[in-house]
Amino acid sequence: MRVTVHSVAGKMPRWVDTAVGEYTKRLPRELKLQWRDVPLAARGANSNVQQLREREAESLLKGVGPGDHCVALDGRGKPWTTEELAAQLEGWMMQGQDLSVFIGGPDGLSDDCLAAAQQRWSLGPLTLPHPLVRVILAEQLYRAWTITIGHPYHRA
């Protein structure tokens, strides 16, 4: 299964790339994690937030494969425990579909991205900076995978 994280982002600090790379390389070939970044829409003093989100959504959605199961990271989504994420991951793998995960820009995801998503996942009630979301997402996907195979990385 391929997991593609479609993200509205600029250049990430080296520590983010290092951490994300570490968790990505730990995953097996059967669970390929890849990152697809699209640029932020140009912002100005009088920018219309809805239009910015729509432009970013257009870029995000272009990268979704036919038949991908889509999950939007959204503060209004359902928060999953790590064990629930592991169960979700196992279910996605059983479906045999690739997974697309959306991470919005500073103004969030557009209604189009939210509508394209079969699920909405919240990382919790805190507002997290984009670089940290990437690291948390990569680590939690790795942790969830270790739970599905009984690896001792996760100690509940």
Image (tube, helix red, strand yellow):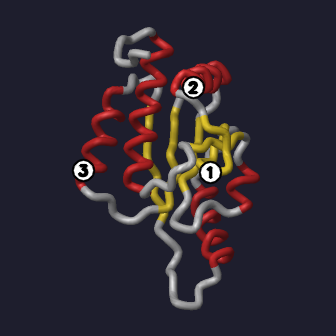
* Left or right placement of residue 146 versus residue 58 in this view: left
| Residue 9 placement (x, y as % from top left) | 44, 62
Please tell me which residue is depicted at 63% across the width and 77% down the height of the picture: 49
User: Residue furthest toward the front?
Assistant: 125
Q: Which residue is mark 1?
A: 74
Q: Earlier in the sequence, mark 2 or mark 3?
A: 3
Residue at the top extreme?
A: 150
Question: Where residue 106 is drawn, which disc sits there?
Answer: none
- Nearest to the eye among marks 2 and 1: give it: 1
- The spot of residue 76 in percent (x, y) is 67, 50
Residue 112 coordinates in the image, percent (x, y): 73, 60
Q: Nearer the viewer, residue 40 or 74?
A: 74
- At 60% from the left and 20% from the top, the residue drawn is 87
> What is the x, y in percent for residue 37?
45, 57
Kindly tell me whether residue 66 is visible in this rendering: no
Neighbor class of circle 1 (other Cα within 10 Å; few <14, some 14-19, many 20+) is many
